[in-house]
Image (tube, rainbow, N blue to C red):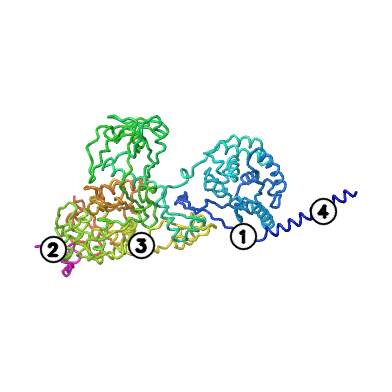
Amino acid sequence: MRFLIWFMSFCFFAVAVAAIGLVIAYSYFGDGLPEHNQLASYDPPTMTRVHAGNGQILAEFATEKRVYVPINAIPQRVINAFLAAEDKNFYQHSGIDALGIVRAVFQNVQNYMKGRRLVGASTITQQVAKNFLLSNEVSIDRKIREAILAFRIEQTYAKDRILELYLNAIYLGSGSYGVAAAALNYFNKSLDELTIAEAAYLAALPKAPSNYHPIRKLEQAIERRNWVIDRMLDEGFVTEEEASAAAQDSLEVTSREDSVFVKANYFAEEVRRDLYDRYGEDVLYGGGLSVHTTLSPRLQKIAESALRNGLVTYDRRHGWRGPETQIEIDEHWSETLAAIEVAPGVDPWQLAVVLEASAESARIGFADGSESGIPLAEVKWARAALDDQKVGAAVKRVSDVLNPGDVVAVEPVAEDSDGNAYPEGTFALRQVPNVNGAIVAIDPHTGRVLAMSGGVSFEESEFNRATQAQRQPGSAFKPFVYFTALDNGFTPAHIILDAPIVIDQGEELGKWKPANYTDRFYGPSPLRLGIEKSRNLMTVRLAQYVGMDKISQTASTFGIKNDMEPVLAMALGSGETTLMKLTTAYAMLVNGGKRIQPTLIDRIQDNSGATIHKYDQRPCEGCRDVVWSDQPVPAIMDDREQVADPATAYQVVSMLEGVVQRGTGVRARAVGKPIGGKTGTTNDSLDTWFIGFSPDLVAGVFVGFDEPKSLGAKETGSSVSAPIFTEFMKAALADQPGIPFRIPPGIRLVNVSRSTGEVVRAGSSDSILEAFKPGTEPVPGSPAAILQTSDPATGVSSARPVPLAAPSGQAGTGGLY
């Protein structure tokens, strides 16, 4: 009895001491702990996701790749996998699992004796306390603080809220924070699409994701996944049949980039810059924005292909610059080739090494050890590149170009240039172009940018030549000189003298003697012919008469260039601008003179789904109605600013249609639909352009070297840029009917001679339907006078020519007097 009393007293004393110790420890370690109430308003950094116009993902911006998913949207299968692996008693304990701790102690004794890694006994609640409120320090102090915080968290929050925080915060490798991001990154699936095996694999990762990498450490990853499946079976979360089948599943990861992402790097980077400027770095990379862009994946793919093909075609005309590098052809050549870093711009081509080269073909090898061949026909283009854009002698043998050990870019081809089929596995020699360029496509009615590529390789250079490159547009600016003239009393049938002209620029600059591209003079010609054939001398005379101050104002109105110097050289496109600005200006001609602003973003939503930015601010009553079949389509106001006379804009559009039909842009006729456009080539062919349009789509192309130098003596906007535009528009409009350009009210169409501007009978060989404003139509038989603003004897023009007044009663007769 005395022993029993003594033992009970000892136990009571021990419990009291332990209780006092716990109180002291709780007070000591609990003092100064982080405030756990902040978890109630926890808003984790989440990915900003950028979507193309059809909803596909264009880009994701994040410091932590996380997609936050509420607990009621997480499938039970995923929850069960993590409970089985991490904390099977989660819904029973109060933050600390005493039985789990006891089991861990015994397990760790055994592990210590066998030299194995010690295991922990942290509950999910403790992991939340550590991940959100504490550091990863390994110490007894931190474990005690973690336990205290876990107890406090359990007293404050519901179990589901704790589990929600855990499943959205846990790091699961490959840059994935939370189960939703991991499901996307590993399997390209949403959570509700995961199989038992896939959910179990994710639940296997929290302890050490790098130890169970699905590629580098596949065996360990499957072993750990199957351990989780066994735990799920033990807890009754799956049946034996389900567990057995899941354990037999292979572990295969799926790249999201190949199946989900739209490739438009330059476009995505422009969007990123815009978001950064609007909201700052924290919101961009952690605000969970949902950004809906204007990009059309179909048109973007066409634009990327057309630009690359055009640059490659130009590059091939100027010769072969040699292999990427060279290696020894020995028994280890495939390993050596595999170790070579692929240069930017090679993708989507492949690297291969020349194993043998003969007269008719080359035998090539790839990094995987496979072999193939290149026939002579696919090497003939590779004449040696010489200085001044010249090329060497014609290629007659493959061995004239390729030698064993050359590492080259190649592309599989199915047929030759004549359409004859090649044997399967035939390759063609390729070369990454060193010229660069850009293409942009815009909806002329809204300004929505539908496609944009700023160069041949974003990996090589992030510089966007569509928006950042300031280059001279050359003759691509001329339509706005003619627009200014048409807006100031001229008609397309007015006659301008195409003859030598000399401009006295003063003692310092001397005399300026502009010339046509052909160095020829064509005499009196209508305005239309001047723009169709891109006559420089006619343009200078017209600009001199109209006044460069007015042309400078036109350039500003259309957003091409603000404060353009009012000097005549600007009329020939010597003022710098960007491809985006010039293409937008053409779009305003097409839409009838309505101001638009190019935009890449339609709408931005915050992480709660609320719209915080919308490009189109117009109200639309009834637009939210689900069914419109029994009511009229809602009418939406047109609030675009009218910046130009629609009649003048149409006259220019009609003349630019003539550029494609009969002028310098004739290559674009291959589109086979109503098309207008203008070429542009600067002095010494430093820059080449083609800006063109259909009634509902405008596209601009620029090509030039980043460090300006001549593209070649005969390289022009017609030969370099127009083929890119043509390839793009031909594919873009392939499934659309040919729509004629819209004619504004009041325009009078009169049959005139294209070469003289005089009225002629319909059906005449030289006749065209010319557009005139009311009251300016030419009168049959009226003379067509010549605009002469220089001294006929000397050809020297005054700096400010005096306008010649029209005789009384002679206005609108088709001639300028």
Q: Is residue 588 left or right of residue 574?
A: right
Quickly name the residue at label 4.
12
Label at residue 198:
none
Quickly name the residue at label 2.
796
- In the foreground, 246 or 394: 394
User: Which is nearer the N-term, disc 3 or disc 4?
Assistant: 4
Marks 3 and 2, how far apart at CA: 39 Å
State yes or no: residue 808 in magenta.
yes
Q: Residue at the far left: name it.
A: 793
User: Which is nearer the N-term, disc 2 or disc 1?
Assistant: 1
Marks 3 and 4, how far apart at CA: 88 Å
Q: Is residue 194 left or right of residue 773?
A: right
Q: Is residue 235 visible?
A: no
Near mark 3 (Cα within 10 A), the count class, few <14, some 14-19 or many ≥20, is: many
Label at residue 38:
1
Q: Is residue 481 left or right of residue 293?
A: left
Marks 4 and 2, how far apart at CA: 119 Å
Marks 2 and 1, how far apart at CA: 81 Å
Front disc: 4 or 1 = 4
Residue 214 image-quadrant placement? top right
Q: Which residues are magenta?
A: 793-816
Quickly name the residue at label 3.
595
Near mark 2 (Cα within 10 A), the count class, few <14, some 14-19 or many ≥20, is: some
Residue 553 on image: x %, y %: 28, 66
